[in-house]
Image (spheres, rainbow, N blue to C red):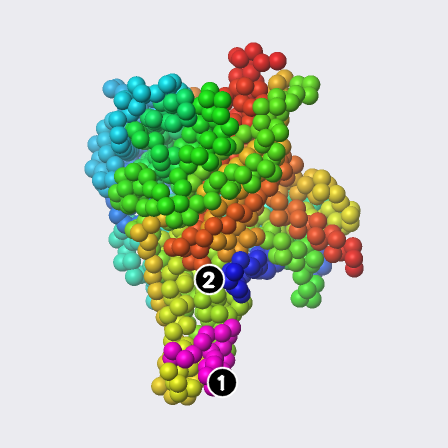
Amino acid sequence: MTDYINIGKNKEKVDALALAAGEPLFADDFALKDPLHIAFLYSPHAHAKIKSIDTVEAESMPGVALVLTYKNTPRVLYTSAGQSHPEPSPYDMYMFDEKVRFVGDRVALVAAESEEIAKEAVKKIKVEYEMLPALFDIEEAEKDGAPVLHDGEEHVMIPSAIYRPEKNLAARIAFLYGDSQKGFEEADFVQEATYYTHIASHCALETHVTKATFDHYGRLVLITSTQVPFHARRIVSNILGIPLGKIRVIKPRIGGGFGSKQEVLLEPYVALVAWRTKRPAQIVTSREEYFVSGRTRHAMRSRIKMGVKNDGTIVAMEIDDLMNAGAYGPHGPTVLANTGAKVLPLFNKIENVSFYADCVYTNLPVGGAYRGYGATQGFFGLNQHIDHITRLLGIDMAEFVKKWHIKTGETSEVFKAIGEGKTGHEQVVTSCKLSECIDEAARVIGWKEKRGAKRKEGDKCYGVGMAVATQGSGIPLIDMGGAHIKMNEDGSFNLYVGATDIGTGSDTVLAQIAAETLKVPSEKIIVLSSDTDLTPYDVGAYASSTTYVSGNAVKRCAQKVAERIMEVASEMLECPREELTLGVEEVSHVKSGRSLSFKDVAYYAFYAKNQFQIEESASFVSPVSPFPFCATFAEVEVDIKTGIVRPLKVVTAMDCGNVLNPKLAEGQVEGAVLNGVSFSLCEEYLFDEKGKMKNPSFWDYKVYKTTDLPEIVTILVPSFEEYGPYGAKSVGEVAINTPGPAIANAIYDAVGIRMYDLPMTPERVLKAIKEKGVG
Amino acid sequence: MSNIEVTITVNGTKHRLMVGPKERLLDTLRERLHLTGTKEGCGVGECGACTVILDGEAVHSCLILTAQADGSEVITVEGLEKEGQLHPLQEAFIKHHAVQCGFCTPGMLMSAKALIDKNPNPTREEIKTAIEGNLCRCTGYEQIIEAIESATRALESR
C-alpha cells in the first residue's frame, strides 16, 4: 500500500475559492477598452444560394465600423474542428459562403460600437436568396437526385475515410474481419434491430464568447471560451494568413464545454474584425445562437444484427450505422469511427464482424464533438441488443456481459483497424475491472431481487436495466501534451501546462501529479495553463486525454526536476547522488544523517555557486489509449397511462484506474450520468418543415433540474493502469454512454416495450405502450 | 427614450445611477458596477445563472429592469464575503467539490442564501426546490445539494 501525500486525496480545486467568490474569471468578465461588438446575420433558409447581398445601408449606419460577407473575407476552405493537424475532418466551410446550408448558417456580420447598433445594422442587410430544395432525411441523402449541399467547391479531406460530397457523403468507414455471412449461417438464431439516437445540445451554461485585443507588440490576443487554444491559434492563422507567431490565445475559466468548444467557431471572425479595424472586438453569443449555430451531438441510425448460438456465443455481428453530419462535417469522420472503434472491442470474442458506417450531410444544424463522441450513439444500440438476446437465451445479462467482455491482457482486431485520424494502433487491455463494476452496481440496485419482478402499483410499472461501456484515454500517437516546471526559492514550483481545464479540475489533478512526484504537498504547486505564449503545447481538453496524456507529461517533467534537485543537493552535501533520498520537501543523506530542505537547495542554486534556474520540460504522446470501463444499473417507474418514465435510481460503477482525486472523479461521473439521463428522456431538437429549430431556449428544450433528480449513486472501482500516471485512466466521458441504454433496458423490464428511438419522451413511450397493448 | 435615475443599494453600498429604460438589472450589475460574478446563461429567466437577491427574494436579474429596482436592496455573490471571510455556503461549496466550471455557482449560492435566510433548517426536498431554477450541467447537482446541507448545519451550530 503506497503512502501517497497527494494521490488519492480529495484536494480542493485550485480555482474553487475564486469561483465561489464570483471573481472575474470568465471570458466575458474581462472588459476590453472600447471594443467593437459583433452581431451575425443568420440564414432563414435551410438551403439557398445568395443571389445578391447589399450591405450599403448597414455600413452607413452611425456606429458601424465594418460589415463582412463572402465578398470581403478570405476565400479559404477550412474545418472548424479543433483537432490535431492535419485535421481529420473535411475542409468544407468558408467564413462566409455564397450559399447557405441550414437555418442558422452565417451570412454576414456587423461590427459596431455597441451590441444594439450591431443588431440594428444586421437587420439592414438586404439579401436575395435563390431557394434550393432542402434535405433533412439521412436515408435520402445518398440517393440519386438528392439535393447536394457541397457542390462545385474544391474540398480537402484527409484520407482516413472515404469522402464523396457529390453524394452528400461526409465520411464512410468500413471494417470487417472473419466472415459474418458464414457466421449467421452457423448461428442458432439471428436478432436484428434498428436504433435511433438524436440531435442534442451540450447546454454548457456559458455560451460561446470570444474577445480579441492587441498586445504592445501589435500582436493579436484572443481571449476565448475554448477547449482547444493551440488548435485555435493555428487555424485562425491559416484562415486569415496572419503569422502564427503574431497570435496569442488565452483560455480563461470556461463555463462548461462538453465538446461544444472543441471547435474554432468564432475566433476567425473576431480576429478578422480586430485585425482589419485595429480595434479590440468581441462577441458574446445568445443561448439561441448556441443551440442553432453552434454544434450538436450527431444523430444516428444504427442497425445491429447478431447471430447467436444457444450456448450464448455471438458468432457474428453486423453493424450498419448512418450518421447525420448536419450542414458541415467537423468531427464527422472521427465520431463515425468511434461508433465502431469504441463499441466493437468491448465484445472482442465475436469472430465475425462487419462494420459499415456512413456520415451524410443534411440541411440541419451542425454536428460536432460531444462527450462520448460516437460511443454514446453506438452503446445505446449495443446494450439494448445484448439485453434482448440474453432474454431470448434465458440468461442474466449481467452474467453474460461478465463472461464475454474484453478482459485484462486481451486485444481486439478493431484496435488496429479503426483510429481517429490515422489508422488504428494495436493495443492490449492493461487494466479492466468491468466485472467487478457490474457486481458492485448490481448489488446496490438490487438486481437479483428486482429484475423480472414485474412489480406493478396501479398504473405504475417498475423495472431495472443495465448497460456497460468503455471509452479511451486520449488518441494514440496523435494527442500530445507538454509541461514545464520551474522551482522557486521557497520550495514552491510553477507548473505550466497547455492542458485545458474547462471546469473538470485538470489544473488541480495535474498539480497533484507534479506534487506527488516532487514529494511536496500540492499546495506548493502554482498552476498556469492554456496560454499559447506562456505554456507548452497541448492538444486541449477532448478525447479524455488530460489526466492520462498531459498527466504523464507532468510526471515526466517533475521527475526531471526532482533529479536536478538531487544533483544540487549532491553538490551541496559533497556526496554521491546515489546516496541521497528524496523526502517530503527535503533531500536526505542517510549515511551522515544530514538533510537539506528544498528551500536550502533552491537558495543555493539561485545564489551560491554554479547558479542556475532549476527547471525542466517534458512532453508525452502515447502509443496506447487505456480503456476506462463503467456499468450503469437503472431502476425506472413507467406510468402506462401517461407514458412518463421516471428514473428512480441510477447506479454507476466506474473503473478509471487508480483514482487521483475521488471527489473530482465522482463529480465527473455524476455530471456525465445526469447528462445521459436527461439526453435519453427529455432533450430534443424540434424542427419545423422548413428546417428551423422551434425550441432554441431552455423554455422548451428541457434539461434535468434538481427536482427531476433520480437517486444517483457513484461507485469507484479502482484498478491500476500501468501506463497511466500513478495508475490513472480517464474518467471524463465514459459514464455518459450508459444511462440511456440502462434506462431503455429498465423500461423493457418494466413493461416489455423496447424503445428504439431517443428521446424516450412520454409521447413515444405511450405510443409504444398502446401499439403493444400493454395494460 | 431617455435615461432614468435609479437609486439602488448593492451589497450594502448605495448607488445613484442613470440607466436606460430597457436596461436589465443583470447589465447594470455587470457593466456599470463591474460586479461580474452574476452571469448570463440564457437571457430568458430559465437557467438561473443570473440569480441575485432583491429585497430578500431570489430573482432572475435578466428579467428585472433596473428601473423596476429603484429603491431596492440587491445582494450579489460579491456581497457574501464579509471582511475577507467567506460565507459558510461558499466554504461548503469548496469543501464539497460543488464547484466544477463555476458558472452556475454564483446563482446557486444566491438561491441557497435566499432559502436559508428564510428557512435555516431546510429539508433536502426544500433545498432541491429552492435551486430548481438553477441549471447545472457539470455536477449532476449531488455535490451542490450536499454542500448546502452542510452549510445549514454549520450555520446552525454557530
The answer to which image quadrant residue A571 occupies is: bottom left
Does the magenta run of residues contain A681?
Answer: no
| Type of amino acid under label 2 | Ile
Q: Quadrant of the C terminus of chain A?
A: top right
* B15 is higher (above) or lower (below) than A753: below
The CA distance from mark 2 to mark 1 is 28 Å
Q: Which residues are magenta?
A: A577-598
Q: Is residue A472 left or right of residue B149?
A: left
Q: Nearer the viewer, residue A718 or A261?
A: A718
Q: Which residue is mark 1?
A: A594
Q: Give whichever of discs 2 and 1 has the lower sequence position.
A: 2
Residue located at (34% from left, 64% from top): A618
Q: Is residue A659 left or right of residue A222?
A: right
Residue located at (42% from left, 82% from top): A569
Q: Which residue is mark 2?
A: A513
Q: Secondary structure at mark 2?
A: helix
- Chain at numbered mark 1: A
Q: Inspect this view and state whether residue A513 appears.
A: yes
* A417 is higher (above) or lower (below) than A33: above
Q: Nearer the viewer, residue A392 or A152?
A: A392
Q: Secondary structure at mark 1?
A: strand
Residue A729 locus on image (x, y percent): 44, 51
